[in-house]
Image (spheres, rainbow, N blue to C red):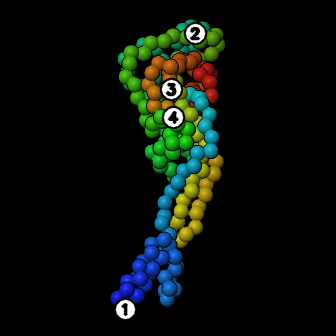
Amino acid sequence: MRTKSFMSATLAVTLTALIGGVVPGNSQVRSCIAGTTYVMTSKTAGWMPTNVGSTWINGPGNATYSSTITATSSFTYSGSVTVSASSVVASAEATFGIDYGTSISRSSSWSYSLPVPASQQGRVLLLKNADKIVFTKYVDNPNCTTTTTTGLVAYVPTASTDNSSYCWTIDIAPAKTSWKQTCSD
């Protein structure tokens, strides 16, 4: 009988400790499981620059690009707190039902030409479709508190590499270096 009581008490103390409760007779602070969760708030479809573009020319004239190269676009984030790109991408995929990637590449023979207006400097630039994702980061701390950071923004390329997921635009100086909602300058 005493063995059953001892086992029951041991099990109760063990379970209480595992779920973060205070163990009877122990004045130590309870321990919680630490972890990070990303919750997606919204997404907006758009375009981000790749590494593929012509040299700059002074208009009027045609900016032309023609080469076989690998076009690359990557997850971009510049917030005030550290985030895991792969975790944000996984959460965005689960939330929005879209395949994303932290870095998307496509090797191809690229060729395009667009006019640069008079008195302007420009180039042709290949863009990749990418979503602007707004999200919240929740950090569950070992002391059983949660740190919440809202309004974080990442630009995440879609995983598709078919032709419709790329577009060419004329990039008028200064250089296009960030995400845009439309495929135009």
**Residue at the spot of label 2:** 115
Query: First in sequence: mark 4 or mark 1?
Result: 1
Horizontal and vertical percent position of residue 78: 55, 44
Residue in view at x 50 percent, y 19 percent: 164
Q: Residue furthest top?
A: 61
- Residue 2 is marked as 1
Query: What amino acid is labelled 1 in the image?
Result: Arg
User: x, y (%) of residue 142?
Assistant: 50, 69
Q: What element carries label 1?
A: helix
* Residue located 59% across and 61% down the image: 147
2 or 3: mark nearer the eye: 3
User: Of the residues under marks 4 and 3, which one precedes in the sequence?
Assistant: 4
Q: Distance between the residues labelled 4 and 2?
A: 34 Å
The numbered dot on residue 128 is 3
**Image position of 30 with respect to 102: above or below:** below
Residue bearing mark 4: 98
- Against 135, residue 145 (above or below) is below
Mark 3, secondary structure of its residue: strand
> 10 Å neighbourhood of mark 4: few (<14), some, or many (≥20)?
some
Give the foreground label among 4 and 3. 4
Mark 1 nearby-residue class (10 Å; few <14, some 14–19, many ≥20):
few
